[in-house]
Image (cartoon, helix red, strand yellow):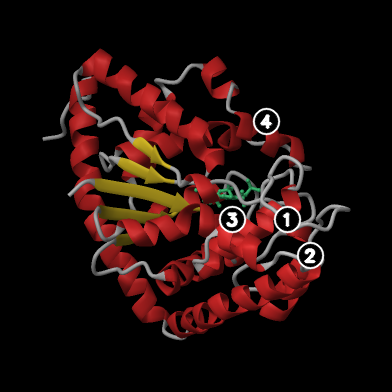
Amino acid sequence: RPRVLSGIQPTAGSFHLGNYLGALRQWVALQETHDAFYCVVDLHAITVAQDPKVLRQNTRVSAAQLLALGIDPERSALFVQSHVPEHAQLGWVMQCLTGFGEAGRMTQFKDKSARQEAGVGVGLFTYPILQAADILLYQAHHVPVGEDQRQHLELTRDLAQRFNTRYGRTFRLPEPYIVKDTAKIYDLQDPTAKMSKSVPAGVVELLDDPKRSAKKIRSAVTDTGREIVYDPEHKAGVSNLLVIHSALSGESVDSLVARFEGKGYGDLKKELGEVFTEFVTPVQARVDAYLADLPELDKVLARGAERAREVASRTLARTYERIGFLART
Ligand code: AQP
C-alpha cells in the first residue's frame, strides 16, 4: 500500500474548520487505501513561545480530536513528533541542504513573521525544512494538506531530489494531496483571507460551544446582494458558506443553490449553524471520552511512536550512511 504522512500543530488546542475540511477529513479517508502516519507536531509548535503546561495539555487534546474525528490507531500510526527523535535528526541534515535564499522565499514565513509581535525565532524560518524531514522519513507517497502548504511540499520535493542527486537515491518524492473544493476555507469575518487560528474572530473551532459557533456563522460577512449563488470572485462570503455546508452535509453546492433560491443569506447561515452543530456535537463527546482516560490515550500514542520509529530509524540510518557519517560500532 502507498504511504501517507501528515501532521498538525497542537498550538491552538482546538482544531478549526479549515484544518478539518482542508486536511483532517482526508487523513481519515486515506486510511482506507494507505499505510498512514499521522503526527501531532509539537516540535513545530515551539517555533512560537509556548507555555509548557498548556503545550502538554494541547498535545493530548489534539490527539483526542484526531481519534474523535476518525483516525483509527489500529490502522494508522498516530504519534507525537517529539517522541520520534529522528524528525529533529533528519531536520538538521535537511537544513544543511537548504539554501538561505530558498528558505527565504517561503511565503508562509513572511505572513507569520509579520503577525508575530515578539521577536521572530530562527525556528519559524526553518520550520518548512523540518516539515520536509517529517515527510521524507516515512517515504510518503502522498501528503494530505490544505492549499497553504503547497509551497512547502515543493521545497520537500526539491530537497529530496537534491539529496538523491548528490548521494544516490534515498528519498521518495512525495505528492501533495489537496482536495480542490475544500483546499482553502476562508475566514468568516474576512472571506478573502484563509481561516486561521491566528485570527480568532472569523474562525470556527471544533471544541468551542456549538451555540457560539452557530452565532459566529450567523454573523459571517457576506455582501450587499441577495442572491445565494456560488461565485467565489464576487461573492466570497456566500461561496465560502456554501462550500462549508456542502462538505459537512454531503449535499452538492448546485443542489444547495437550487434549494435556497428565493431565500435569504440568514436562512443559509441558520441552516449551516444547525449542520455544523449536528456534526460537531458527537465529535466533542468523543473528545471528552478520550480525555477522560489519559493513561489509555498516552498508551495509544506510545504504540504509534513505536511504529513510526521502525520506519523513521531505517530511513535515518540509510541517510547517515550515504552522507558519510562513521557508523557507531
Ligand atoms: N483555512 C484553511 N483551509 C484549508 N486548510 C487549512 N489548513 C489550515 N488552515 C486551513 C490545513 O490544516 C492543516 C494543519 O494546519 P496546521 O495547524 O499545521 O498549520 P497552520 O497553517 O499553522 O494552521 P493555521 O490555523 O492556518 O495557523 P496559522 O494562522 O498559524 O497559519 C494543514 O494541512 C493546513 O494546510
Sequence-wise first label, 1 or 4: 4
Dot 3 falls on a residue whose secondary structure is helix
The numbered dot on residue 18 is 3
User: In the rendered view, does 319 fall on the left or right side of 18?
Assistant: left
Q: Is residue 112 above or below residue 110?
A: below
Q: Disc 2 vs disc 4: which is toward the camera? A: 2
Residue under label 1, please give it.
238
Q: CA distance from mark 3 to mark 2?
A: 21 Å
**Type of the residue with mark 1:** Val
Q: Disc 3 vs disc 1: which is toward the camera? A: 1
Q: Is residue 90 above or below residue 25?
A: above
Dot 1 falls on a residue whose secondary structure is helix
Quadrant that contains the C terminus: top left
Which residue: 31% across, 73% down?
A: 299
**Type of the residue with mark 4:** Lys
**Type of the residue with mark 2:** Tyr
User: In the rendered view, does 17 fall on the left or right side of 138?
Assistant: right
**Type of the residue with mark 3:** Gly
Q: Is mark 3 within 8 Å of ligand 1?
A: yes
Which residue: 64% across, 59% down?
A: 242
Q: Are marks 3 and 4 in contact (CB under 8 Å)?
A: no
Which residue: 80% across, 70% down?
A: 266
In the rendered image, is residue 89 in sight?
Answer: no
Q: CA distance from mark 1 to mark 4?
A: 29 Å
Residue 197 is situated, as x and y percent measured from the top left of the image, at: 67, 55
Front in this rendered view, residue 299 or 148? 148
Residue under label 4, please give it.
110
Residue under label 2, please give it.
265
Sequence-wise first label, 3 or 1: 3
